[in-house]
Amino acid sequence: MDAEWDPRAEYDVSDAERESKKAMDASQVWRNPEFRMTERERPTPEDDEVLVRVKYAGICGSDVSMLETDDDGYVHYSAYLRLPNVTGHEFAGEIVETGDDTQLFEAGDLVTAEVTDYCGRCNMCRQGFNGHCENFEQIGFTIPGAFAEYVAVPEKLCWDVSALRETYETDDEALRAAATIEPSTITYHGLFARADGILPGDYHVYHGAGPIGLTGMNVSRAAGAGKVIAFEPSDERREIARKLGYEHVYNPIEHDPIETIASVTDGEGADVHVETAGAVTQTYPAIGDTLAETANVVHISNAGSDPGIALRKYQGNSAQLYGSEGHTGQQVYPRVIRLMAAGQLDNRPMVTSTFDLSNADEAIRQAAERVDGKVLIKM
Amino acid sequence: MDAEWDPRAEYDVSDAERESKKAMDASQVWRNPEFRMTERERPTPEDDEVLVRVKYAGICGSDVSMLETDDDGYVHYSAYLRLPNVTGHEFAGEIVETGDDTQLFEAGDLVTAEVTDYCGRCNMCRQGFNGHCENFEQIGFTIPGAFAEYVAVPEKLCWDVSALRETYETDDEALRAAATIEPSTITYHGLFARADGILPGDYHVYHGAGPIGLTGMNVSRAAGAGKVIAFEPSDERREIARKLGYEHVYNPIEHDPIETIASVTDGEGADVHVETAGAVTQTYPAIGDTLAETANVVHISNAGSDPGIALRKYQGNSAQLYGSEGHTGQQVYPRVIRLMAAGQLDNRPMVTSTFDLSNADEAIRQAAERVDGKVLIKM
Amino acid sequence: MDAEWDPRAEYDVSDAERESKKAMDASQVWRNPEFRMTERERPTPEDDEVLVRVKYAGICGSDVSMLETDDDGYVHYSAYLRLPNVTGHEFAGEIVETGDDTQLFEAGDLVTAEVTDYCGRCNMCRQGFNGHCENFEQIGFTIPGAFAEYVAVPEKLCWDVSALRETYETDDEALRAAATIEPSTITYHGLFARADGILPGDYHVYHGAGPIGLTGMNVSRAAGAGKVIAFEPSDERREIARKLGYEHVYNPIEHDPIETIASVTDGEGADVHVETAGAVTQTYPAIGDTLAETANVVHISNAGSDPGIALRKYQGNSAQLYGSEGHTGQQVYPRVIRLMAAGQLDNRPMVTSTFDLSNADEAIRQAAERVDGKVLIKM
Amino acid sequence: MDAEWDPRAEYDVSDAERESKKAMDASQVWRNPEFRMTERERPTPEDDEVLVRVKYAGICGSDVSMLETDDDGYVHYSAYLRLPNVTGHEFAGEIVETGDDTQLFEAGDLVTAEVTDYCGRCNMCRQGFNGHCENFEQIGFTIPGAFAEYVAVPEKLCWDVSALRETYETDDEALRAAATIEPSTITYHGLFARADGILPGDYHVYHGAGPIGLTGMNVSRAAGAGKVIAFEPSDERREIARKLGYEHVYNPIEHDPIETIASVTDGEGADVHVETAGAVTQTYPAIGDTLAETANVVHISNAGSDPGIALRKYQGNSAQLYGSEGHTGQQVYPRVIRLMAAGQLDNRPMVTSTFDLSNADEAIRQAAERVDGKVLIKM
């Protein structure tokens, strides 16, 4: 992917951004994006890297929004982006080469990887806040990613998924499943690394059943949710949710969430709310009115605005609200992988479209329709 | 205290309210309040109650707002209130009589008491959520309180403060200090029963240094806060805070909280924000911009409106927001009492006015000025 | 059940014990027990009680040990016991009558119940420690229990299981499943009310797969355990565990737990150890040698002795050890019921013997064989 | 310090140990130790290191035990040790030079440092368990330490203590205090990074008031302990504890800990037990008998044996036992430094002996007497 470096007049470009071509807010800088297939040399892993032969890569909402533009041609994506770059950060593949100073893997291992490369030395990292590393890079955003045959990845970000071979019988199925681990970790991180006190048997409500919401629902079910309820306006995505086995899936436009939640939970309210919609002005009023006692609200999505929060209701129900982003953190990846290996978490039925790498641009156009569960590219 | 039962036209009075004269929202029902001294019979404790000879009682903002009215004469106080009633819920005294079925106390014990009487049997209580009992009564709100010589209190709500005799040498000083335990428990509950993960050495910021904020600052200091910072527009209250030994006390109108917090914390931000001001449209923007990584925001005050919350910042700093009300909960009272007994928590210097019971109305007028640390009535 | 009150010479009987015939340590006092069917009047519920028509009652190890004796004829059971009494505390049934002051249930509701009746007023209860109430009674131990057609139970201890009607189609199946809720809550309490930080995907090891271990394994699986491993010397019980779908079930005499756990977890160790065997001198050495980093060890069983604990290994693995007993606590019952209603927890396949109430003595003899998953009595 | 590499016959030396001369268990390998002053070249910091001019260095029990031997001349110290080496790991000083790739510090900053250098890449580190890094080195044990004029330290291990200049007025006093931060972090880590649920106002009991116990008592007091109780057989150390302001300090040989704790806590028991004695066969029986409900037991010391633990008492009191070692972890150092900067934690009165670097051997002999609070070496 590439685009023109053309900072908006009102955007104050830092020296660091100018030098590194790593924009802090892509939507202020990158214009007229294009996405095309090119031949590149096969990367050589650094000493601490492994080289992964990618087998499947998923398309994330961010991959789409990097290529969508406003009327002035600026991309929608509003976080860090360095171009030109190979995008793609949800992937799985096989290790084919290991750097000289690696110790965790060997060729033949099946792996997936975390997105954020952290330095381990800055003031955030040394306090254990690797996910907010001050010197971070992101695979598929600021360093080369996985819409490619090969990607070189720091060993410390890779996690072995070879155990899925037994669960899914073939390497191909194992890697197809493993390519959906990254989106699953986003909600796992929100529910179990950020929030505290979510109990097996709790009632979970997802506001938004797109790719993140759907993998999240699967994580909640795997973790023993008493009920999983979802609100999603897209007919197609509600249908996917139902096919995944969820009974309580509603169009929030037709079914008032407040009444619906009261009814499905028999008046007890939701113990866990997960905001995966981004439609915060619609979702937060409903959340406030359906809090069970000690409810945990986990905010995952990119909110376009700052919703009014009815603090009185968080007091009256001893509720709390957690901001969550990313998936970096203690044991998030290994635990999601184990859930998948145990057969508790199976995202494969939500993969609704698969394209060859040569049709990657078509894959992204399909994902931009926002009707799929998950769109995969197969290498 | 008494007032006229005159529900506003638009307020839908329930049968239960009409029968019990226990309004769920006093400001919709009670009009033209009056507060006066009357002779009443000394109460006789029920089997599970003790009779307390009150020595000191503090005036809370709610005691004031019950007597303040809007243009139509309706009281400001907007929660549960049954009238006529003896108000007053912050108090300490000596047990002079015990009910037939009590086991925890004997005459001569010095005590203070929790406010909320919980049934122990409803669906909230049996899950451990006594503070949100479905059949609750509140001392000084719906059942007789402590602006009186004697008050009968369920034994289970009383906590022994006799250990303060040793700390403060005289019974009188012990009880004067003990009358400030109740407001201290409000923030202790927010910080240590509701929030999770507040560490000794954390930087705490109080937004609002009225009676609740000031006792809270003392609790934070006793619990090992690395710094306690306060924003308070009242000159008098900032002065009281300084006399209590706090260095970082600012007028938020003159000192921008964002810059001030950045400066005092050397750019690290606040680990703990406590909203005790109620001015949520002013405080929450500043809170969002001064969150340290993993910051805990504890909302204590009565918010007049629903502030916009910048969720993006809670994500970017792994921060969380807890609603907190009341003080009912595991070990809150005994731990606050122990902090006081240990000499770690001394609220006496913030008592700025003391009146005899015969001048209780004057005490309330003084409290209504909102310039005191704490106004006490002495019996 | 009845027995002779004949305190051992060396046992110091308290006045309270003598008066109430409620022995603190049954094995020191009760001799020559007998268990027989008698006609009793149908109990009348107190104001705060409901009357339950029992449909199924499970036999617990304690029910058995009350009837087993040492050479001097003293019962094995070593906790609180008042005789004569109707024993049985694992049960489910239908409410047929409600006391005058109840509010949570009505006739026709299907329910199960907690065992420990707490006073709600003592120094333990008022701090939220209801499970360690100073004035507790226990259904089936100190007050009449469920090996009977009817049992009167304080309403606050009952939990509605009517939702299981939908899951299991018939009332009979719903109640058969519900009778196994009580043993399931024992481990749920240990894992999720006592321990802190157990994550979905964790590897759980059960030391002992008797009735408590087996229900525990089901709870762990329902809560998203990555693997559930069990060690159990009884051939019959290992076979039951396998029928429940568990792959990793071993005889600890033949398969060294240390090597086995290392192998099954691929060297990562156990994140969660649950001691449900009581054979602490055997189990704790193995536990110490198979601790994963941050492992949680939950002690559930009655330990006959005090095992040596290799503290160095708990340091070297940042591990912790929790003592857990009973099931009283926040949300334990409602959450277990929800797991069952959701189809995540199905204990029915472990019910290996069922007897009519008229053959209750035979049921207890069968349970004493210690080869069953769960023995039920059907009324 | 140096010694002879002479592995005991029965000790199985690994190739890695032989090559690196880094013994995993020093007491099995190093013989006839000697400690002497030598001239060495001033170290040059690596790219990611800073060079610290040491001002004060404390003597730890491990520094002593490296020089004490058994009858065969093997050192007592039983963990990792590479020789020859400069020992000493409790220190504070001023940065005089920074490596080319450092970003956190500049010359003139006052600092102290963590002991364990972690790789940030191994399977432990990448899950956030830096303290149990698989490739760790330890300052003063396996890499050069602080009994020297200069020490080169990885920047990421250093923490700025310049704020102490304001608290203690002179650089010298600031650094004298800062040299005691490392031992303080050991208990802070145990209490607040390992244990969970320690509340301000809790009663803390220290079993052992040597250098770790004494700094721990100061940490507990700074964190708002309701009472701090200590048992220590050394007359001198009890006297030091009293001089630090502690009232409840006992000789466990003369004052039975069970009775004493019952008396001091008015029968409520200890909420927090900290084992800093190592005399586990004596301390654990007393701990088991004095557990308050929900008590936290934190094991810090090197236990010579595996004590019998009365699990029944941990069940009966909902208590838990945490193994804790080291101090690596989220925010431990910065929070201890803030407590010190706030004046809440002052260890200076426990410094009972100070020697010049030229008398370092004498300092170690003095520490070996085990009667001091803390012995410092001044450079």
Image: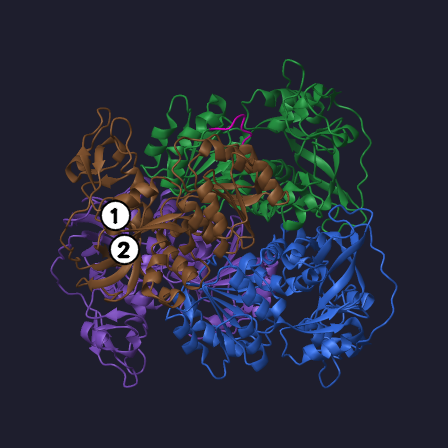
Chain colours: A brown, B green, C blue, D purple
Q: Is residue A226 above or below residue B59?
A: below
Residue for badge 2: D91
Q: Mark 1 near mark 2, Cβ–Cβ under 8 Å?
A: no
Q: Secondary structure at mark 2?
A: strand
Tell me which amino acid carries mark 1.
Asn
Task: Please tell me whether residue B304 belongs to the stretch shown in magenta.
Answer: yes
Q: Is residue B77 above or below residue B120?
A: above
Pinpoint residue D33: horizontal percent, then vertical percent: 24, 74
Q: State which quadrant residue B285 falls in.
A: top left
The chain that hosts pointer 1 is A
Does residue B206 appear anywhere in the picture?
no
Q: Which residues are magenta?
A: B300-307
Does residue C81 appear anywhere in the picture?
yes
Tell me which amino acid carries mark 2.
Phe
Residue for badge 1: A359
Relative side of A255 to B308, left or right: right
Q: Secondary structure at mark 1?
A: helix
Q: Nearer the viewer, residue C271 or C370?
A: C370
Say which quadrant the N terminus of chain B sits in: top right
